Structures are given as structure tokens and as C-alpha cells.
Amino acid sequence: MRAGDAHLLRRGSNPFPVAMRKQRETPLYQVTALIALFAVLCVPLGAYLWTTLNDLLSGHARVRELLISAPVLVVFVLVLLLWARVVRRIEAAREDAPRPT
């Protein structure tokens, strides 16, 4: 830290500059919005796949449902992989964040 950067420090026990700390933290409202977004995307996809699988196992599945479920499954898996990537990024940022002493 340079001598002219003293104004970047917040008073308290955290020695990292405020600008550096803000880059590492993910605010709670962003995490909540991401959870809501993924829930809105995944719940209908998962419900459709669950219903199709239930129909398939009971012997009442139609070919059209099975053909529709293939791309739905791909989208569902991609959304879950994206969600896992976001969670890993948030967790890594949380682990790297400076801890108050």
C-alpha cells in the first residue's frame, strides 16, 4: 500500500483497502437474486422431467413427451452446471476474503 492510499482504509480491524474488499464480497441481495433466478428456471424444468420420467416408468409415456424431454434435460443440466460454477465462485471469494481479527 502506498502512502497516499490511507484514505482507502476503513476504520476498524480489516487491513485491506475498501476497494479491494468490495471486489471480493458478493452482497446478499445478489446471492438471493441468483437463487431466485435459478429456482424459477429449474423448478419448471425439473417438474417436467419428473412427470415425464414418472409417465415413462408407469408405461404411459408418449413419443412427443420423450422427444421434448431430451432438450429440456440438456438445458436443466446446463443450468445446474452454471449454478454450481456460481456457487464455487462465491465460496472461493468467501474463503479468500480477509477475516476480521
Image (cartoon, rainbow, N blue to C red):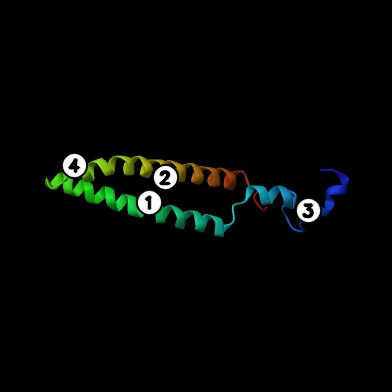
Mark with earlier residue (3, 4): 3
Callout in the foreground (3, 4): 4
Q: Tell me: 67 left or right of 89.
A: left
Residue under the image location 25 percent in, 40 percent down: 67
Can you tell which of label 3 and label 1 is closer to the viewer?
A: 1
The reply to whether callout 2 and callout 4 are in contact (CB within 8 Å) is no
Q: CA distance from mark 3 to mark 4?
A: 63 Å
As measured in the structure, the alpha-carbon distance from the residue carrying label 4 to the one carrying label 1 is 23 Å
First reached walking from the N terminus: tag 1 or tag 2: 1
Q: Are marks 3 and 4 in contact (CB under 8 Å)?
A: no
Image mark for residue 63: 4
Residue on which the image places disc 2: 79
Query: In front of the other: label 2 or label 4?
Result: 4
| Residue 22: % across, % down | 67, 51
Disc 3 target residue: 9
Q: Look at the numbered discs 1 and 2 and tell me whether their residues touch, using CB distance below 8 Å.
A: yes
Say which element carries label 4.
helix
Task: Please name the amino acid that badge 1 sits on.
Answer: Cys
- In percent of the image, x 78 and y 53: which residue is there? 9
What number of labels is visible? 4
Disc 1: which residue: 42
The amino acid at mark 2 is: Val
Amino acid type indicated by mark 4: Val
Say which quarter of the image contains residue 63.
top left
Q: Amino acid at mark 3?
A: Leu
CA distance for labels 3 and 1: 42 Å
